[in-house]
Image: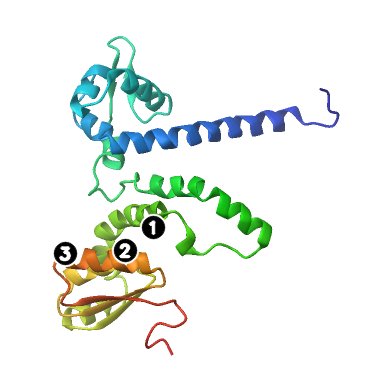
Amino acid sequence: MSVTGIDEAKLEAFMGQAVTDMGAIISAPLMVIGEKLGLYKAMAHAGPLSSQEVADRAGVAERSVREWLRNQAAGGYVEFDAASDRYTLPDEQAMALADEDSPVYILGVYDSIASLYADEVKILEAFKSGDGMGWHEHDPRLFHGTERFFKPGYRAHLVEDWIPALDGVKAKLEAGAEVADIGCGHGASTVIMAEAFPNSQFTGFDYHAGSIEQARQRAESAGVGDRVEFETAAAADYPGNG
């Protein structure tokens, strides 16, 4: 096929970008596998490992791990030494892929990405109807993934950096204040604040009932149920917004 007027350089650049995006799309489910099977944790701070050693440490089959490692090496997520046929998860990658307490842990977001594919039929219908798609209509992995993606940042920065940057807010919370957390989701930020400021009372609001139920469980598990409550309400109609 011959098309006149095509800028070959622009076409080549676009195709390069598209193929790179394809690689990312293919790698995303493999990263979910790496997390769920504990492959990243098996490699973290362990030095160079053979595919068999990774499989043994994670308790899974070597054949599949070998293919997984090849994908990860091609994407730069692990390092491969051809001479020894061994793979290494660098400490920097381990911080983002194997340590759930790290402020840069990123694997939670892949649950959210997976939800978009599960929602394909609903999204197609929303495009056709123009009615949009409510947050509550998404696959549950979106809610779970959103919490897991943002929570490490909240743990690292909310109390230590963000609240102190607000003039006078930290002192008020320490003395005792009433706090509304609007759009609280599963309550990660609410619970973290309640743990740090026991003299204050916190109320989290979210219109998604399923998230509110999860938030209540999070508060009880964290032992802050005496100073935290969660209510189902939209941003326009939560109590005291007028």
Residue appearing at x 31%, y 23% in the figure: 65
Give the Cα separation between the discs numbered 1 and 2: 8 Å
Q: Confirm or deny contact between disc 3 and disc 2 (CB under 8 A).
A: no
Residue 128: x and y in percent read: 68, 57
Which quadrant of the figure has residue 90?
Answer: top left
Q: Is residue 152 above or below residue 24?
A: below
Q: Which mark is residue 222?
A: 3
Residue 221: x and y in percent read: 16, 63
Q: Is residue 22 above or below residue 235?
A: above
Q: Secondary structure at mark 2?
A: loop
Furthest residue in direction right, as rendered: 4
Residue appearing at x 26%, y 83% in the figure: 178
Q: Confirm or deny contact between disc 1 and disc 2 (CB under 8 A).
A: yes
Residue under label 1: 143
The disc labelled 2 sits on which kind of residue?
Answer: His
Number of residues whose C-alpha sits closer than 10 Å to that of mark 1, classed few (under 14), some (14–19) or many (20 or more): many
Residue under label 2: 186
Work out whether residue 39 or residue 211 is closer to the camera in this orientation and state it: 211
Q: How is the image coloured?
A: rainbow
Give the Cα separation between the discs numbered 3 and 2: 13 Å
Work out whether residue 99 or residue 139 is closer to the camera in this orientation and state it: 139
Mark positioned earlier in the residue sequence (1 or 2): 1
The disc labelled 3 sits on which kind of residue?
Answer: Ala
Residue 218: x and y in percent read: 23, 63
The disc labelled 1 sits on which kind of residue?
Answer: Phe
Number of residues whose C-alpha sits closer than 10 Å to that of mark 3, classed few (under 14), some (14–19) or many (20 or more): few
Which quadrant of the figure has residue 5?
Answer: top right
